[in-house]
Amino acid sequence: MELRHADLRLKVGHLKEAGELYRKMAEVFLEKDMKKEAIEAFRKLKVLSTPDIDQLMALGDLLCDQGDLDGAEEEYRSALKLDINNLIALSGLAEVCLKKGGYRDAIIAYNKILTLNPGDITIKEKLCDMHISRVINRRQSRSAWKWPSTIIQIIVPKKP
């Protein structure tokens, strides 16, 4: 089965059937590691129906894998509009923003994860690494003295 079967259903006005075929094809393409085809199927499905969070996340992951960081960011943000507390979408958004050099947005997403899951050591490590690399990359003595206190706040947050 190929996308053209779903395209044909779409042309003759069978929107629901076309949407279901696009959904099934996206899943098949994912299983077969046919990423470009899966992206195409997910995008066509988005036009026909309101995507669910799993579709948006899958599309975000695929776009990120293909190097389309702007597209991936858009999908993760769309997923977060459906569930602002989705840890996987927050993590995906943070990683994409970090890859794009958007440290501020990545830090916001990682901090949101820590708000939801305060004991997440992996996220704390990523935040510490980000702060250290920013200081090293800036090579500014003025901000260099701030990073130890920032890291301590990440590792040992203030008690309310």
Image: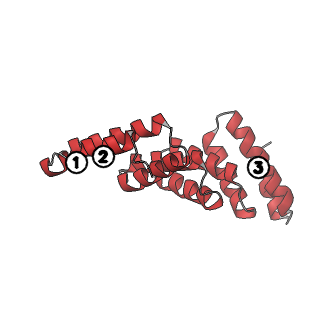
Residue drawn at 46 percent across, 35 percent down: 122
Q: CA distance from mark 1 to mark 2?
A: 6 Å
Q: Check disc 1 and give the amino acid type.
A: Lys
Q: Residues within 10 Å of mark 2 (few under 14, many from 20)?
A: some
Q: Residues within 10 Å of mark 3 (few under 14, many from 20)?
A: many
* Tag in front: 1 or 3: 1
Q: Residue 91 location in percent, x, y?
A: 52, 45
The N terminus is located in which quarter? top right
Q: Residue 150's mark?
A: 2
Residue drawn at 50 percent across, 52 percent down: 112
Q: CA distance from mark 1 to mark 3?
A: 49 Å
Discs 1, 2 touching: Cβ within 8 Å: yes
Q: Earlier in the sequence, mark 3 or mark 2?
A: 3
Q: Residue 13 location in percent, x, y?
A: 85, 66
The kind of secondary structure element at disc 2 is: helix
* Tag in front: 3 or 2: 2
Q: Residue 88 location in percent, x, y?
A: 58, 45
User: Is 15 situated left or right of 55 in this image?
Assistant: right
Q: Residue 28 location in percent, x, y?
A: 74, 39
**Quick one: 52 or 33, which is closer to the camera?**
52
Q: Residue 23's mark?
A: 3
Q: Check disc 2 and give the amino acid type.
A: Thr
Q: Check disc 3 and give the amino acid type.
A: Arg
The kind of secondary structure element at disc 3 is: helix
User: Is 21 situated left or right of 55 in this image?
Assistant: right
Q: Residue 146's mark?
A: 1
**Quick one: 37 or 96, which is closer to the camera?**
96
Discs 1, 3 touching: Cβ within 8 Å: no
